[in-house]
Amino acid sequence: MVKAIRVHRPGGPDALQLEEIELPAPGPGEVQIRHRAIGVNYIDIYRRTGAYPAEFPFVPGHEGAGEIVAVGEGVKDFEVGDRVAYVGGLGGYSEARNIAADSVIHLPKSVSYAQGAVMMLKGLTAQYLLRRTFRVKKGHRVLVHAGAGGVGQLLCQWASALDAKVVATVGSPEKAEIARKAGAQDVILYRAEKFDERVKEITKGRLCDVVYDGVGRATFPASLDCLAPFGMFVSFGSASGPIESFDIGLLAQKGSLYATRPSLFTHIAKRRDYEDMVEDMLHAIKREHVTIDPPQAFPLAEAAKVHAALESRQTVGSMVLTP
C-alpha cells in the first residue's frame, strides 16, 4: 500500500483526497519509482476540474523524480537503484508508482530530485516551444505571457540565451523583477497597462515574431495585435480559461498570422524525439542557458493547498510535492 492523492469527481482543490492505494508489481515494460519529488503543473488543475478528460477516480500528476525500486519483464535500460525522472501518464501524486520505461530518463547526478521533478514537463515544454514549434533565433522578437511563472521564466531565459529580444507580461512589480532576472529585456504590467499597446511602443511598431501564451482567455485576441505579419501565435495553456472559438479569418485580417495549439505529449510520443529533446534541454542547462531553480516544496498531503495557490495565480516559479 502507498499513500496517494486521488480525485473521484470533478471539483475544486478539495476534490484532492489523500488515500492509501494498492500498488502492484510493475508489469512488462514498466518500472516502479519511489518518488522523491513530484512536479505540480497547471495541467493537473485541468484534470481535476474535468477541463481535460480523465477516467475517475484517478491519481493526478504527470512528472516526478526518484529511484527505481523494481523493474518489469523486458526492461533493459534501467535497473533497481537508478536515479530517474519522467514525464508521462497520470499517477504522479503518490509515494510510488508504476510507469512505462519509455517515459523515464536517467537523471544526471548534477540535477537534484526536486529539480528533476520540475525540469521534465516545464523544461520540455520550453524546449518544444522554442526549438520545435517556432525555432527562435538571434534577432527574433518574442512575447512571453506570465513571464514569472515556471514555464515563463524558462522561456525568458532560453530565448534570451538564443539572442532574441524578449518582452514579458506579468501581474505585479515583484513578478516583473523575476521576469527581468530571467532574461526579459522589457516587462509589461498587464493589470496596469494594455500589453498590446505597450508592445507596439517597445518594438517601435515592428511587433513580435512569436507570442507564447499560456494564459488563454484573458490575453486573446489582443495577443494577435502584438504580432508582425506572418508571426506565430502559440497557445499552450489556459490559466485564465480557454480561448473561445473565433473566426479564422481574423488571422488574415491581422497580417496572415499563424496560430497553433501544440501539446508536449505529441512531441514526445516517439522515444527518439523524447530523448533528443531531453538531450537538448540538459545541454542548455549545462551551458547555463537555462537554470532550474530549486522549487518550493510542500508535503504530498498539502496538494489541495498548492492547487488553490496555483489556481489563484499567486505562485512564482515551480513547486513540488514530497511524499
Image (tube, rainbow, N blue to C red):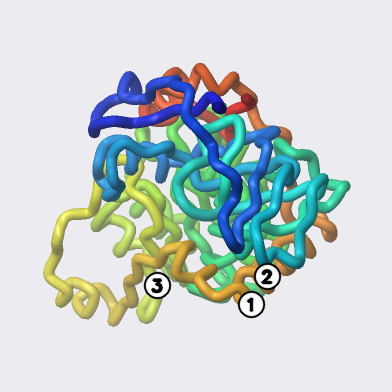
Q: Secondary structure at mark 2?
A: helix
- Does 196 appear above or below 132? above
| Tag shown at residue 83 | none
3 vs 1, front mark: 1
Near-viewer residue (304 or 248):
304
Label 3 vs 1, first from the N-terminus? 3
2 vs 3, front mark: 2
| Tag shown at residue 275 | 2
Q: Amino acid type of disc 1?
A: Arg
Left/right placement of residue 23 relative to residue 242 reads right
Residue 1: percent from left, percent from top: 55, 27
- Determine the CA span between mark 2 and mark 3: 26 Å
Residue bearing the label numbered 1: 272
| Residue 134 visible in image | yes
Left/right placement of residue 9 relative to residue 69 reads left
Residue 286: percent from left, percent from top: 84, 58
Label 2 vs 3, first from the N-terminus? 3
